[in-house]
Image: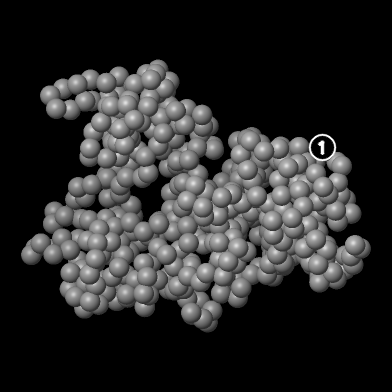
Amino acid sequence: MEYDYTDINSIYCYAKELEGKKFKDIGTNENYVRNIKGGLGQFLEEEYFGYEVNSRAEADFIEAGVELKVTPFKRNKNKTISAKERLVLNIINYMEEVNNSFEESSFWRKNSKILMVFYEWLKDVKREEYEITKTILYQFPEEDLEIIKDDWETIVSKIRSGQAHTLSESDTMYLGACTKGVNKSSVREQPCSEEPAMQRAYSLKQSYMTFLLRNYVFGDKKSERIIQNKSELKDTTLEQYILNKLEDYYGQSIDELMKQYNIKGNPKQKVQMVASKILGLTDKLGKTEEFQKANIKVKSIRVEKNGSINESMSFPSFKFKKLLQETWETSELRQMFEQTKFLFFIVEKNKTGEYILNKTIFWNMPVSILDGPVKETWEETVRVLKEGVKLKPSGNKVFNNLPGSKLNSVCHVRPHTSKASYEPHNPNSDELPDGKWMTKQCFWLDKKFITQIILDNS
């Protein structure tokens, strides 16, 4: 069928005809189909929609104001659907974007309406065999747009202050500034600073795209919202709105708040459960639409009577062999910190032994720390694994030479479980590259570093 490239409805109807087709059924330009990066989108642009590939600032369908994006999803082992990656939009021109308002920005001029074409990614399947499953015409909901405007302002404010080189996806909620380039040499000049900055592009976070897929594209499941009306964000950000609500309860006992809200349940989740009630929620804070879209993780930090923190902060265990297959830039550890924002609840023990809600902090890993001490710990872990982990029994314990807290005061490696095991195929152990087995390990943020985060935000 023919379509009118100036009419948004005609474009959408034509795009819907793609559903159920494999890429090999659409055209013959195998060069685009098999191209390692960006090929499938370019393939559809030329072979199906009939316009030449371009890098202009306007939307692909200029007259209709519609941008075309082709993006993969995957099915997980638990049968849920997830976005395979973030949705990369347009390159950020640091020198020009600082002169624009949001409405004049390259992001908004190009991406206010997006024709999203979803295909299912399958391991070990040729790209031309991928099947297009869904196409949608997406316009940002009003409540999302308020948060995206704040995200855009956060990104551009850093550029205006000569800090483009410190940008991170975790700076923002839904709209990210992701790296865009082959390697670390892909840099651009920035205003107000002579420091070169990594080339970056606007992107919708992977967590945002996963939520979109699960709740709108493949279903209509509704998650609870913190913000019920966009007017609640008129003069504040989502972060500040949450902090303002919780601030009224600083100094109150967690146990007393549990009684006040008639909360029973898992003691490990009590702080998050209290916070949910304060914000008027029925479910956990981490399950809200905003937290899922923004990939915000909730953590509680306990401060003892003497002001010290007794526990470092753990993260999911890693597979020894899989770690050796990574590069630092694509490693799970780096991507996790690059894409995750944290909400820390600081609870402090008072003289009577009760834990008091002392403070709440939104925090994300600074790039200087991520590509400094955290990278150092990751690289040392890789080195030890390659050379062979040295296991040294002593009494009832077995010591190893993976990087501990003495390497730096930020990040170290130690067991993920209190149940040690060096037996093959034990649930608490993992196979080393040399064939031996040892207790599962994970990366930890050091308690000294966490203490510093609290001090920096006091």
Q: 132 and 68: which one is in front?
A: 132
Residue 235 can be seen, yes or no? no
Kind of residue at disc 1: Asn
Kindly identify which residue carries mark 1: 31
Tell me the quadrant of the picture where the C terminus can be found: bottom left
Is residue 261 in view?
yes
Quadrant position of residue 31: top right
Residue 137 vs 23, above or below: the answer is below
Quarter placement of the N terminus: bottom right
Q: Is residue 76 above or below residue 429?
A: below
Q: Residue at x 50, y 37 (%)?
A: 331
In x, y percent, where is residue 311?
A: 23, 47
Left or right, 311 with respect to 68, comes to: left
- In the picture, measured across the screen, residue 267 lies left or right of residue 292, that is left
The quadrant in which residue 146 appears is bottom right
Colouring style: one colour
Task: Name the residue rendered at 38%, 24% in the picture.
Answer: 432
Which of these two is toward me, 54 or 157? 54
Q: Point out residue 14 in the picture as x, y percentages from the top left corner.
A: 83, 63
Q: What SS does tag 1 mark?
A: helix
| Residue lying farthest to the left in this orientation | 352
Q: Residue at x 67, y 38 (%)?
A: 125
Q: Locate residue 156 relative to residue 104 in the image: left or right.
A: left
> Where residue 78 sits: x, y (%)?
47, 51
Total of numbered circles in the picture? 1
Considering every residue shown, the one lying at the far right of the view is: 2
Query: Is 399 located above or below residue 147 in the figure?
Result: above
